[in-house]
Image (cartoon, grey):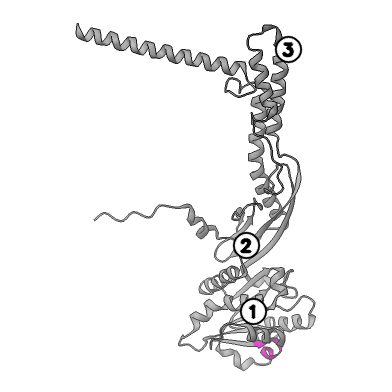
Amino acid sequence: PTPARPAAYALSDDADIFGAAPSSVVDAADDAGAAILAAMLGGRRRMLVDVRDADLAADPRLLTQFVELAILPVAAGLEGLNADRNRAQIVFPGTAGLLDYRAQALSAPDVVALSTLDFFGNATPNRGRDALVLFVAPPPDDAEALEALRQILEPQDPNEALQQVVVLLNYHMIPLQGIDLAKYKTVYHLRLLSVHYVSKLGRQSSSQSTPTTPLGEGPEAEANVNDDDVNDDEDDNDDDDNDDDDEALEAAMAHANAGTTAHEVSTRAMVIRAYPRPWHIFVDTDPAAAADFEVAATFDREPSPAEINASIVECIEGSEAEEELVAQQMQAALEAGQLEGIGGPWLGEDAEGSRGEGEEEEDGSEGDDDAGTRDAGTSGEE
């Protein structure tokens, strides 16, 4: 039997290759949970989930939702597992975070335990059941909690080091301080960026755009057409025709340059890494429209701020350069006279003449075809 042919590649598969920019905290939490589970199955023992979102840091409800969804894939895998370590534990910096989680969490599976840094640090005998421990990073200004977390993760006695899989969740706007992150693999990273730039193209929203008269319409174009019709048979008014052509050329160039006034534009960008995918930079190239984010660059390591800035600038300039190139080519063609004879109200006499010649040529060609047909018929009869 003939083996089945593989399915053809589709553009919709790009999301499976490059990933997609999350549209909400729920999407980001789902991606983080899938990344944690994939890294755990891949043998990773020390992981970092770095989500820098101002809303997540300011809203305890969003934080609870993110933590719950991020730990859900691992909890589902541990549930019903016949093993000594069949539990995941979430460690909060203090009791306030723990109480918020208990009050707002939608589910409380038996395989998920809750604790705080102080209690977890003094409960060494109870760590044997934990297969994974997720630490919620303390605030950057809480030096005492940061020191307690460092002592748990980096004890002086190597025998007291955690044997479980450790996940650090940093939801603050700055990197986690006081911890040696070189030992941790970034399995999920999300950084929201606000981009402001000056656009040379008039890519404004419909409410801000200035209406323009289409080329060849309006009172000025009609006046030019009327002037050309009156002066079709007058050879002594060549200067007037040249003036009309110059005005029409200036009008056409003004139309080509319509909307090129520089103005400030604000858009969004994201730096995303979801294990096992590499690092991606997504940019919203058209903030006025409901368009998806486009992949601006891909890195196999965490990009530096200079690389992020260069990738965003290159992506934005590339989208605008294409439109600007079309406008420049239109201007160059008008100045070189390459658009003459195409037809239009600013061409006047030339357009009429070209159309008349074209009709005569068509009539002549039809006459020749008829004559050829008659000759062929006559020869056939003979």
Q: Amino acid at mark 2?
A: Ile
Q: CA–CA distance between discs 1 and 2?
A: 21 Å
Relative image position of residue 373 (x, y in whole percent): 30, 12
Q: Is residue 344 above or below residue 255?
A: above
- For the question of whether residue 155 can be seen, the reply is no
Q: Along the line of sight, which residue is nearer the eye, 2 or 313?
A: 313
Left or right: 204 with respect to 375? right
Q: CA–CA distance between discs 3 and 2?
A: 64 Å
Circle 1 is placed at which residue position?
64
| Callout 1 touching callout 3 (CB < 8 Å) | no
Residue beneath the point at 21% across and 10% down: 380
Circle 2 is placed at which residue position?
272
Q: For residue 326, what is the image quadrant?
A: top right
Question: Quadrant location of the C terminus?
Answer: top left
Q: Secondary structure at mark 3?
A: helix
Q: Is residue 126 above or below residue 361?
A: below
The span shown in magenta is 115-121
Circle 3 is placed at which residue position?
239
Relative image position of residue 96 (x, y in whole percent): 72, 86
- For the question of whether residue 118 can be seen, the reply is yes
Marks counted in the figure total 3
Q: Along the line of sight, which residue is nearer the eye, 317 or 273?
A: 317
| Callout 3 touching callout 2 (CB < 8 Å) | no
Q: Secondary structure at mark 1?
A: helix
Relative image position of residue 187 (x, y in whole percent): 60, 69
